[in-house]
Amino acid sequence: MTQAHTHTLDHRLRASDFRDYIYKHQTTFQKLGFREPAAAAMGRRPARCYRQIKNKPYPKSRFCRGVPDPKIRIYDVGMKKKGVDEFPFCIHLVSWEKENVSSEALEAARIACNKYMTKFAGKDTFHLRVRVHPFHVLRINKMLSCAGADRLQTGMRGAFGKPLGTCARVAIGQVLLSVRCKESNKSHAAEALRRAKFKFPGRQKIIESRKWGFTKFNRTDYVRLKSEGRIIPDGVNAKLLGCHGSLALRRPGGAFIDAAVN
C-alpha cells in the first residue's frame, strides 16, 4: 500500500472517530450552544408518487394540523360578475381517470387557461371556474440521507408521515375546469382547455356542454322558459319559478308570482 493510500485511510478513520465522538456527546454540545449545520433544503416529492387513490379521504381537521396552504387560492377568473345571459356557451375539461390532482397542477392549469383566453379572446370575454378543490392532505415520512443518518432514523417504524401538501380526489367523468363565453369565442375556449390539459396527469376530454352557461337548463329549454317568463336571472345562474301559492291559482298562466309575468 502506498503512502498516499495510507494517508487517505488514516484520514477516513480519524473522521469516523470524530463523528462518533460528536454523536456521543451531542447533548453536551447542545447545552454549550453548539448547533448542527442546517441541512440542505429538500426538493418537493413528485406528484406522481401520490397519483393513485389508495386511502380514505384525509382532510384537514383538529386531528390533522400543520397542513400547508394549497397553491391554488383563486377558483373564479375573468368576468365572474357577468350575468347569466351574457355568456351562453359553456365548455368543460373532464377527467377520464380516477386519480389525485395536486393543488400545484390546478394552479398551473388555471394560469395557462387564463393566459391564453386573456391574450386571444380578451379579458372581458370569458369566465373560468375551477370545479375541484384540494381537500385531501398528502403525507411524507422524511428519511435522512446524510452521513450517520442510520443512527438517527427508525426506518418504517412509526411511518405515519407529516403533512406535505394537498390534492383533489378526482373521479371518472368529473369536471375539472369550466369556461363560459360567447359563441364567437368557443374555439379560443377549446384551445385554452387543450393547453391546460398538459398540466394534469392522466387523460382528460374537452366536452362542449348542452347547458346554458353554468346553469342546469339546456339551451333550448332556457330560451323557451325565458320567453314564457318562467325563469329569472340569479347571478351566473338562473332561478326557475315554481307553482307555489294557493291551489285556486294553480291554473295555466296564473300559478306564478308577479316577477314571472313581468
Image (tube, rainbow, N blue to C red):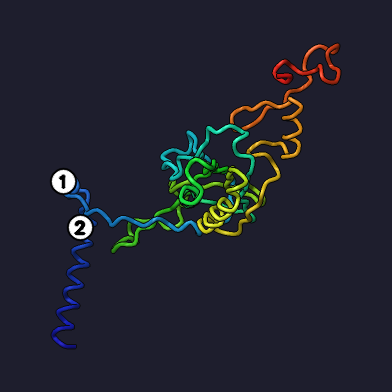
Quick one: which residue is furthest to the bottom in this view? 1
Q: Residue at x 74, y 19 (%)?
A: 261
Q: How many marks on residues?
A: 2
- Say whether residue 149 is left or right of residue 126: left
Query: Quarter of the image holding residue 231?
Result: top right
Task: Judge from the rendering whether residue 52 lies leftward or rightward of residue 119; answer left or right.
Answer: right
Vertical position of residue 245 compared to residue 75: above or below: above
Residue type of the residue flagged with mark 1:
Gly
Q: Which mark is residue 33?
A: 1
- Which residue: 14% across, 79% down? 7
Q: How far across and down, in percent of the image, does residue 208 sit?
A: 66, 49
Residue at position x 77%, y 18% from top? 256
For residue 22, the mark is 2
Whether residue 181 is visible to the viewer of this picture, yes or no, is yes
Chain-order first, disc 2 or disc 1: 2
Please name the residue shown 86% across and 18% down the image: 251
- Judging depth in this view, the residue of 166 and 76 nearest the camera is 76
- In the image, residue 240 lies at what x, y percent? 72, 27
Q: Is residue 148 above or below residue 121?
A: below
**Tag 1 secondary structure:** loop
- Tell me the kind of residue under disc 2: Ile
Local secondary structure at mark 2 = helix
Label 2 crowding class (10 Å Cα cut-off): few <14, some 14-19, many 20+? few
Q: Which mark is residue 211?
A: none
Q: Position of residue 37 (x, y in %)?
A: 21, 54
Mark 1: few/some/many CA within 10 Å (<14, 14-19, 20+): few
Q: Position of residue 207 (x, y in %)?
A: 66, 52
- Say above or below: 143 vs 123: below
